[in-house]
Amino acid sequence: MTNAHPLRGGDPTTVRRALTDGDPLPGTSGFAGEVDGRLVRDVLGRVPLFVERTGGSGTRDWEFEPTELEEPVAVPAGAVADVDALAKEPDVSAAFERRWSLPDPDPDSSHDDALERLESAIRSAAESVRSTDRDVAVAFSGGVDSALVAALLDAPLYVVGFPDSHDVEAARTAAAAMDRELTVVTLEPADLERAVPRIVRATGRTNAMDVQIALPLYLVGERVAADGFDALAVGQGADELFGGYEKVVHLDHRVEAETTRDAVREQIRSLPDQLPRDTLAVRAAGLEPVSPLIHDAVVDAALRLPDGLLADEETRKRGFRRVAASHLPETVAMRDKKAVQYGSLVARELDRLARQAGYKRRMDDHVTKYVESLCSERSDDPEALRSGR
């Protein structure tokens, strides 16, 4: 089991220290790979990592991209496995030990202290991006998350969507308020048909929701890469970390928690399933994703926010918006936005294409069936596309 680049996202010294002291947030933007004969993956699963379902001759291959394996299985977030033991273990899941769990720190008693901690963490995360030699552009939707990333990185802005989409209009007004130039990547239905099989191959997912979310990232990434950039900055994670969803306030059937704080934490725990999809979609476009809002320092600061800086009926992401307001026009800092698949109209147009192809809404999961049909048109084995072969 070998890999030319055994560790991504963190230096070996930092990961060794985290293994020794059990620190789940050691100051990285996520990490995964091999260190001293052990496979590791950070607590939020920010760096994708996969192993082969079956081994052979005392070995079991692992890769950062599922397309490189026959039957890829995701390494659990926060897990560690001895490479030699993994090679001998018939059941992949049995070889991994949970090493890191999401911490549960006491909230700051002072709003001012919490906001100062969060401001410092976000600035530090942005500085870690600026200190690299990457040529970065920002996926900009006009919402507060991507706008804060854009303000701190001072990088070119790109928005993607169909001509009458909410995101395109929101990005235009936000860019104007920030006195920034904006590149609009205008979509056509054919762009979705062309990109869907590539998304499925890159992510290993065919379900409608995952594909709808990944498509805007991939399609804006294509343009950004064509314009000569090598990294795409996104506002990933802010809604989960800071209480950006209506359901964390209403505590409806979509959450199990009984308090807003616990509901926010529930959303943070959903990140290990979401982040690999987005990372792999951006990489499929030829770019490295940059996500300053899920840096360890920002996660730690988010977990320490007092209840009054989370979300209520009046304002969601209250503490995050307070910090953003010192960098953005108030109209942008306080703006709500739609989820990317809806704001870009990708979900609407993919649904329309599915119905035009004969996959009617009365059918169970009709868009997923349409996605699979697009893949089968390009392969005699749709399963091969799912697994990345």
Image: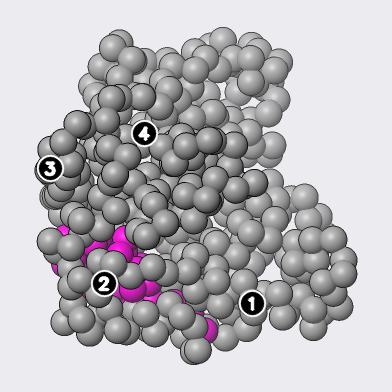
Circle 1: is it few (<14), some (14-19), or many (20+) Cα within 10 Å? some
Q: Nearer the viewer, mark 4 or mark 2?
A: 2
Q: Is residue 240 left or right of residue 173?
A: right
Label 4–label 2 contact, CB within 8 A: no
Query: Is residue 289 within the magenta segment?
Result: no
The residue to which callout 3 is attached is: 112
Q: Is residue 153 left or right of residue 56?
A: left
Mark before the other along the chain sequence, 3 or 1:
3
Tell me the kind of residue under disc 1.
Answer: Arg
> Which image quadrant is residue 283 in?
bottom left
Mark before the other along the chain sequence, 4 or 2:
4
The residue to which callout 1 is attached is: 348
Q: Which residues are magenta?
A: 137-162
Mark before the other along the chain sequence, 3 or 2:
3
- Between 25 and 253, which is closer to the camera in this rendering? 253
Circle 3: is it few (<14), some (14-19), or many (20+) Cα within 10 Å? few
Mark before the other along the chain sequence, 4 or 1:
4
Disc 3 to disc 4, C-alpha distance: 31 Å
Tell me the kind of residue under disc 2.
Answer: Val
Q: Nearer the viewer, mark 3 or mark 1?
A: 3
The residue to which callout 4 is attached is: 31
Q: How is the image coloured?
A: one colour
> Which image quadrant is residue 109 in?
top left
Q: Which mark is residue 332?
A: 2
Is residue 198 among what the camera can see?
no
